[in-house]
Image (cartoon, rainbow, N blue to C red):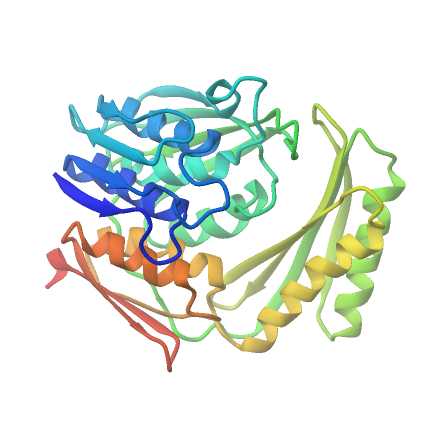
Amino acid sequence: MIDIDGSYGEGGGQVLRSSLSLAAITGEPIRIVGIRAGRKKPGLAAQHLTAVRAAARICNAQLRGDALGSMLLEFIPGTAVQAGIYTFDVREAQQGGSAGAIALVLQTILLPLALATGDSQVTLRGGTHVSFSPTMTYIEQVYLSMLRRMGVEAEVKLGAWGWYPQGGGEVKMQVSSGIKLGGINLLKRGDLQQVRGLAVATELPAHIPQRMANRAENLLREAGLKASVQALREKGVAPGAGIFLTAEYQNSLTGFGGFGRLRMTSEKVAEIACEQLLKFHQTGAPVDEHLADQLLLPAALASQQSQYRVAEVSTHLTTNAAVIEQFGLARIRVDESEKTVTVIPVIGD
């Protein structure tokens, strides 16, 4: 059994997600202690518990410690990953429901299902656009687009938007099997092609997304960037608003967002998203801080070496690298001065 220290590095949920994905893929049993020890509320929250149960379901794993707030988990895969039709609902993990991020559940099971035999259809319910996790817009436009370049064939369709605190969003994901994962090389991002955006509101007046869109377009134009932001009123169970910007470079993609909240103007929400995007743009790097650690897992499972340059070497990145290396599938070198990441799969040696 591989023992994993959940308090290592930044001590967050990424340790859990990478460990679950790799346990399902390799069939190795794992024991994680100190789960999310670095967080204000440590242990398994609703979205983490859903990710644990989803990973267990696809490989018939035995579980010990799968409860809300648990800081210890044993996960013993029973079979190879089984492709199929699955539904996972974050609301079921917690009495009274939850807006826990379904993107985190998706990222846990995507690669195991992509490497399985047979296609899969997955319905995910919960929070689609919530703070401190990738939004489904980012997953669709940035994460899955970049993984497609490495050979992963997966598509998502957003059925309903789910904001904090109600959640209630829904996403359907199609995963094609029989893929061969290749490496990725991203040392230069090339010129900016365009910035496209979505300004969205559910159960709120139409002027709110329009004001966000107008402010974002004006700010980005002032900074010399070509931008087109669409204002939409969408379907959701509760009021919510946000803006999501995707920057498309010659060789890479990135995305940033801002969420509406009480007593915050629509213009201010747009300013938050634009500020993040412009800050990244000035770094000249091809890979944003969040994508930097999300690319590690597919790169470790690929048949060739990967190398990419990041905007920032975060503790998220170095923590995830250390967890992945424990499974012996790849060697990962992070050069802090050059801000480069090199992933050398053991099979590619």
Point out the image quarter for the C terminus: bottom left
Whether residue 277 is visible here, answered yes or no, is yes
The percent position of residue 315, horizontal first and vertical second, equals: 40, 62
The percent position of residue 262, horizontal first and vertical second, equals: 81, 42
Whether residue 83 is visible here, answered yes or no, is no
The percent position of residue 69, horizontal first and vertical second, equals: 42, 31
Q: Is residue 191 above or below residue 132?
A: below
Residue 66 picture quarter: top left
Point out the image quarter for the N terminus: top left
The percent position of residue 237, horizontal first and vertical second, equals: 70, 23
Residue 126 picture quarter: top right
Q: Is residue 15 above or below residue 125?
A: below
Q: Nearer the viewer, residue 191 or 59?
A: 59
- The structure residue drawn at horizontal position 33% and vertical position 53%, both measured from the top left corner, is 150
- The structure residue drawn at horizontal position 45% and vertical position 39%, both measured from the top left corner, is 104
Residue farthest to the bottom?
Answer: 337
- Left or right: 39 as drawn, with respect to 328: right
Q: Nearer the viewer, residue 68 or 181?
A: 68
Q: Is residue 191 above or below residue 202?
A: below
